[in-house]
Image: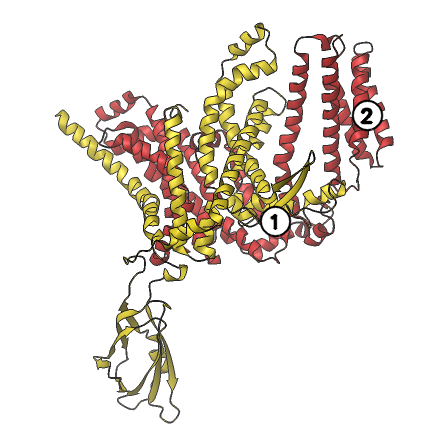
Chain colours: A red, B yellow
Amino acid sequence: MRYKPLLIYLFISSIFLTLVGSIWKIMATLQGLKLTEINFNINFLLALLLSLSLVFIGKKINHLIKIVVLPLIFTFIYIAMNESAPIWYNVGILLISLFFTNRVKNYNLNYLKEDFVSEKIVFDFLSLFAIVFFAFIILFPFYLMFVTSFKLQAALLYNPLDLSIDFTKNISDQFKSYLVIFKTYDFGRYIFTSSIVSIGTVIITLIFAIPAAYAVARLNFFGKTFLSTSILIIYMFPAIVLVIPLYTVFSQLGLRNSIEGLLIVYTATTLPVAIYMLQGYFKSIPKEIEDAGLIDGQNWFGIIAKIIIPLSLPAIASVALYVFMIAWNEFLFSLMFLDNPKSFTLSRAINHLTGDAETPRQYLMAGSVVVTLPILLIFVYFEKYLVSGLTAGSVKG
Amino acid sequence: MNDTLSKIEKRTAYTLLLPAVFLVFAIVLFPIFANIWISFKEVQLKDIRIPEPRAKKIVKSIPEDKTKLKIVYRLRNSSLIEGINNIKFSDNLPRNIEPVNLDSRCEFKSKKIKCDFGNWEAKYRENFEIIIQNINNYVIDKNTIRSQKPKLSGDADNILLTTKFTLKNFKQVFNENEFLDLLLTTFYFTFFGTVGAIIFGMFAAQLVNQKFYGRTFMRSILLFPYVGPVVALAYTWTLLLDPNSGTLNALLVNFGIIDKPINLLGQKYMTLNLLGFDIKLRLALTTVIMFEIWRYFPLAFLFILARLQAVPKDLYEAAEVDGAGPLRKFINITLPQITAILSILFMIRFIWNFNKFEDIFLLTGGASGTRTLPINVYQQGFAVSNIGMGSAVSIVIVMLLIIFMIVYFKLIGKRANEI
């Protein structure tokens, strides 16, 4: 009998069960449940007992009975050992232990004798836990943002742990923060400005980038290698080193507080990556197709418009979405160039809201939801294109 | 024949490239060089406005005589620092109206008052008065007089275009006691932010490379922190970490893990007792690095996942036949396959984290020991209002960047084109 795999199995699986149980407890607390003890040690012992009995029972009794009975016993002892909690919380504990038992149902003393079994167990539980962990740390801030926008400042200050949404309120009370930011804080205008700026940047960038990328990909000219390496290098220079000269020049030219000014800067800063991404794709288009176009008497404009663009629509979509994302999320230039609320973009408007310490946080979070939701929806809907755009363009970020 | 074709090709190429190259030159390259110029000048934020002569026109009636009006022009130099030379003034009067008493500097000709005010020093102010009357002794309508705006012009130096230079900014940048601290903070932030993001990204990629229920869902949400707007996310995090009413502190206090809330973003140091040693942790900086990792590990994840999916499956099968366990497979197959991408990622992310501004600015504003070089550009330029200093710091950043890039291209420049 080798004890090492058995011990590793017991330790890892119990830790896993206890941690997932604790996460469930934290989530329940955030729904307003008054739970104050994690009880890590006791619950760890409980989980250890469950794992131990599971592995020793092994195949001696029917799987189905084992999967149902053991979690039930576990849950009852758990209820007895922990603070009293409503039934839905305990059902959650039962479900977690059911899931756990089902996961390890095949583990028995014989299985633990196989090669590399301890490594496999560690990897198995680690990846299971990683799924829970990553999902939790990523989604939680978004969840917090969303929930806070539906709550009242006073309720949050009174009990920051209660993140439940009160569904009994009527609709206009429920969406009060959103009504306020649109009515009082003029967010409708900011959404409009942000959309104009983002879509405008996409269109102008494509108009400038497609011909330039075509030239870099296909035509021979003096300084070509120099140009294609400088594209990447220029791209590496951050906005922060451009800010002061652009600020001074834009002030003197009266381009601050204007959408045109933002459009110019956004286009110029996204052009290098757009050219870089597009020329890579253009190179992959067979040259024979263009030659056929040349023989048909097309000039370069015809070739770009009738051959290159239709053939590279997926790449153009990627670039467009990527540029849209950059322009929509951009903050530094909008902070520098806009100080008149009439020309604010969404990001700048939210930043402006925080300038006043009196602004209730639910308005701030409602504004954040308004700026986040469109870009997340676009991302989920066009994920394929945006991911390839990100991969190609994410030298920057 | 061939020669002309290649000429046409060249000309076409230049025409196609010109608009894009011009725009990038004007908005990206020009500012980088302009920084050098500005960094050698003593310029304050308020000096950026070119000084101009201004006049505010006030029309007053004269009670004793309804046919006369008094116009007061409040003249001033808009600049508090610089003088304006050769100031010319002109204002139109309606038909049949003429000035009664005219200043010696002025003349009245074809319905126009023209004055030559000479030079004004900085902060110059004057109330310039004219009394006007109607030739036919009619009552003058005040509004028609008011609606005419006076025109002023003058020659002023644009402080940005003068050739007065100074080394003061650079002396100040390097003499500052805090410069070393600034540099260290920046490197600390950059290094740990980069390494952390890559490690998390590697775990996430390894995870998503397996088959499990909900894998596509997981892959999409893993990118959320990067896709979301930085403003919204940073403020959500400030809310989450708030010492008084933040969820995280409330949770920790509730479960008895800490006694009283910790100001994670506002406290510079925290003493940790590890194995009997007191370790002074830079708390706010660590928190900011955590945010940085949270926001940018998706990028590392994306790159590493793409690479992992390209690793031939038979490598793993062969290893299995040879009796290798999961750990062995990871160390001997996966790691060597992804080292190239890891080093490229490290360099690229290092450069970008080095330049990160928004995240720190929104979370702490550079307070509590989180002031990095990019934050310093903003603070010098716009909070202290010293544009020249801000530019000098920018130059320091550009210099360091150039060094990084040389290293980058020396080490992995050739490989960069493969991805």
Q: Where is residue A97 in the image (x, y as percent from the top left)?
A: 77, 24
Q: Residue A354 carries which label?
A: none
Q: Residue furthest bottom?
A: B64
Chain ID, mark 1: B
Q: Which of the two discs, 1 and 2, sits closer to the camera?
A: 1
Say whether residue A183 is left or right of residue A303: right
B167 vs B398: above or below = below
**In-front residue for pair A285/B104:** B104
Left or right of B333? Residue B31 is left
Tell me: residue B221, above or below residue A245: above
Amino acid type, label 1: Gly
How would you rate the neighbour count of disc 1 (Cα within 10 Å): few for under 14, some for 14-19, many for 20 or more? some
| Quadrant of the rendering where the N terminus of chain A is positioned | top right
Percent across and percent down for residue A131 are 64, 27
Q: What residue type is labelled 2?
A: Leu
Residue B186 or residue A336, whichever sits in front:
B186
Q: Left or right of A1: which side holds A384?
A: left
Q: Can residue B108 be seen in this view?
A: yes
| Residue A156 picture location, percent across and down | 70, 50
Q: Nearer the viewer, residue B224 or B394?
A: B394
Circle 1 sits in a helix, a strand or a loop, which is it? loop
The image's mark for residue B266 is 1
List x then y, in percent, for residue A138.
Answer: 61, 35
* 10 Å crowding of disc 2: few (<14), some (14-19), many (20+): many
Instruction: Tell which residue pokes out farthest to the top in this image.
Output: B321
Image label count: 2
From what the image shows, is residue B84 above or below residue B191? Answer: below
In whole angstroms, how far apart are the C-alphas of marks 1 and 2?
40 Å
